Amino acid sequence: MDINKIFQLQDLAVPLNRQGFARELQWCHHAIELALDSHVFLANDPEILAYRKNLRDSDIKEFKFMNVVVNLAYDSMGTLISALRLLEYGVFGDAWALIRVAFESTCYSEYFTLNKEKVPDFIKIGEGVKNDLSTNVLQMLNKSNLKVSNIIDFLQKHDKENRRTFYARLCNMGVHALPLRVSPRISVTEKEFRAYLSIEHPYLRQCIADLAATAKYTLGIPFEAWPDLMQKEPTLVIRYKALEEEYKHIFQVALQSTSEEVNS
């Protein structure tokens, strides 16, 4: 089969998936747009720029802390944009892998917000990777007690949300070789091929819900880390609170229906 034909079929899948998951995808779009607007605000508001320049000159540790937290959250948003695009094509397996990466970046950003003293260790690991891209990052994170599982355990105790189970699903569905994908078959019908392209696939709803949950964590970082700074732009705060309310109504239903679809 011509690979360009597959690309064309993926392009055709986008409007179908947008129609089938209209509310969920619209929320994801709005969440990522708000996160980007928040980061543009933090990077360009004259008073905040003056504040950050003063930090750089007067309190370098606080300056580095703020940059690490902001940049991790910003990196997460960039990854979620790519994941969202894949989801609209219906490529949920690869999207899940990117969501896992975004979730890890978000968790580190949240963790450092609560544990400023660990930021220098993280920066030191980054300097090691800069000098040698083959550096064993996992080993270095372990030595600094910054292993992702430790970070997730800490945050779960802090906010009482089941992050372990959430992270396990991201790893199972997007990172590891998945036994769900190896059922024996003799031939592939057109319906199965459409499912391979993930048009209205039942797992697609779960993947969108997982992207939304990660975006919700990431979206909240500036508002929770620097509430006074974000209050300078009240429209952003209003949008943030509105999205929090919408999330409760949209994704509780999405998760319930996904469970029913997958088990049917």
Image (spheres, rainbow, N blue to C red):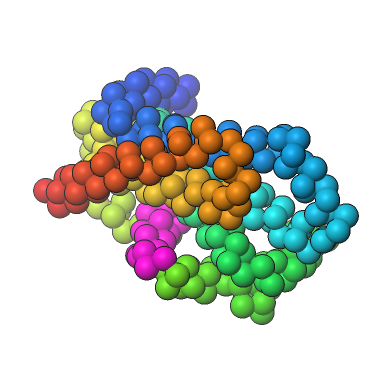
Residue 102: x and y in percent read 52, 51
Say which quadrant the N terminus sits in.
top left
Is 116 left or right of 252, judged from the image as shown? Answer: right
Does 64 sit left or right of 236 as displayed? Answer: right
Residue 183, above or below 77: below
Residue in the foreground of this view, choosing between 88 and 255: 255
- Residue at 66% x, 49% y is 71
Q: Is residue 143 above or below residue 252?
A: below
Residue 60 location, quadrant:
bottom right
Residue 165 colored in magenta in the image: yes
Q: Is 197 in front, or is 252?
A: 252
- Residue 86 sits inside the magenta stretch: no
Image: magenta residue range: 159-175
Residue located at (86% from left, 58% from top): 58
Q: Residue at x 57, y 42 (%)?
A: 231
Dividing the picture into quadrants, the one containing residue 161 is bottom left
Residue sitting at 19 percent across and 49 percent down? 256
User: Quick check: can you spot residue 213?
Assistant: yes
Image location of residue 119, percent across then percent down: 70, 66
Q: Main secondary structure of the magenta part?
A: helix
Check the image and report above or below for 123 versus 185. Answer: below
Residue 184: percent from the left, percent from the top? 24, 51
- Percent across and percent down for residue 221 are 54, 52
Q: How many marks?
A: 0
Whether residue 9 is visible, yes or no, is: no
The residue nearer to you, when weighing 22 against 131, is 22
- Decide if residue 140 is on the left or right side of residue 124: left
